[in-house]
């Protein structure tokens, strides 16, 4: 009888150990699944962050309101004085945008023709000098410290407006 009782205790202990091991394995599988989900979420968030242009949309909006909205309008959609920037910005890389804003006047010249000493640029300058063409009102912002320091923020704001990620109002900080 004592032997049967010891046998029963051993069987129960083995059963309890098996049950405990199964519970640990099941918990590990469940927790492992959660960890994979968190990792996948973080990777997706990181990928989304990296796909955004560099710069702060909010800071770009502030600089735009201060320096650009007087001519291009508070939503960058143009006025009678200056063009709608949204369709133009969609076609520009960050480097092209920087070149355009900091070093050239005419938004209608292609970026390739505007840089350097192209014949088209020389002709435009000659027409302006002879007053055959209207005066240029778009300032070159290269010497303006605030625009120069926040050119990528301006690009971030305008591209967010152009692709619909930012409405016409104030962005969230």
Image: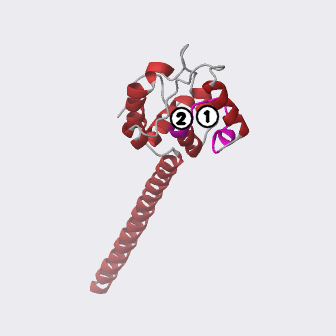
Q: Residue furthest top?
A: 80
Image quarter of the C terminus: top left
- Residue 104 inside the magenta-drawn segment: yes
> Where residue 150 sits in the image (x, y, percent)?
41, 40
Image vertical order of residue 66 relative to residue 44, above or below? above
Residue tagged by mark 1? 90
Residue tagged by mark 2? 159
Quadrant in the picture for residue 80: top right
Quadrant in the picture for residue 112: top right
Tell me how the rendering is colored. Answer: secondary structure
Residue in the foreground of this view, choosing between 87 and 29: 87
Region rendered in magenta:
101-116
Q: Residue furthest left?
A: 2
Residue in the foreground of this view, choosing between 46 and 113: 113
Image vertical order of residue 72 relative to residue 40, above or below? above
Nearest to N terminus: mark 2 or mark 1: 1
Residue in the foreground of this view, choosing between 126 and 5: 126
Q: What residue is rendered at 39% in x and 34% in y?
A: 58
- Residue 21 inside the magenta-drawn segment: no
Image vertical order of residue 62 relative to residue 95, above or below? above
Q: Residue furthest front?
A: 130
Quadrant in the picture for residue 90: top right
Instruction: Check whether the beta carbons of the residues at disc 2 and disc 1 lie within 8 A of each other.
Output: yes
How would you rate the neighbour count of disc 2 (Cα within 10 Å): few for under 14, some for 14-19, many for 20 or more? many
Q: Is residue 106 visible?
A: yes
């Amino acid at each position: 009888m004592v032997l049967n009782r010891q046998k029963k205790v051993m069987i129960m202990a083995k059963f309890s150990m098996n049950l405990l091991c199964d519970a640990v394995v099941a918990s590990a599988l469940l927790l492992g699944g959660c960890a994979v989900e968190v990792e996948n979420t973080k990777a997706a968030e990181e990928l989304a962050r990296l796909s955004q242009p560099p710069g702060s949309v909010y800071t770009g909006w502030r600089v735009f309101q201060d320096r650009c909205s007087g001519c291009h309008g508070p939503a960058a959609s143009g006025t009678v004085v200056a063009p709608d920037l949204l369709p133009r910005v969609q076609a520009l890389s960050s480097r092209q945008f920087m070149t355009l804003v900091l070093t050239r006047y005419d938004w209608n010249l292609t970026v390739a023709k505007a840089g350097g000493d192209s014949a088209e640029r020389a002709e435009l300058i000659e027409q302006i000098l002879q007053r055959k063409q209207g005066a240029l009102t778009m300032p070159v912002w290269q010497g303006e410290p605030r625009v120069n320091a926040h050119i990528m923020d301006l690009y971030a704001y305008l591209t967010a407006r152009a692709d619909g990620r930012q409405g016409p109002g104030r962005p969230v900080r």
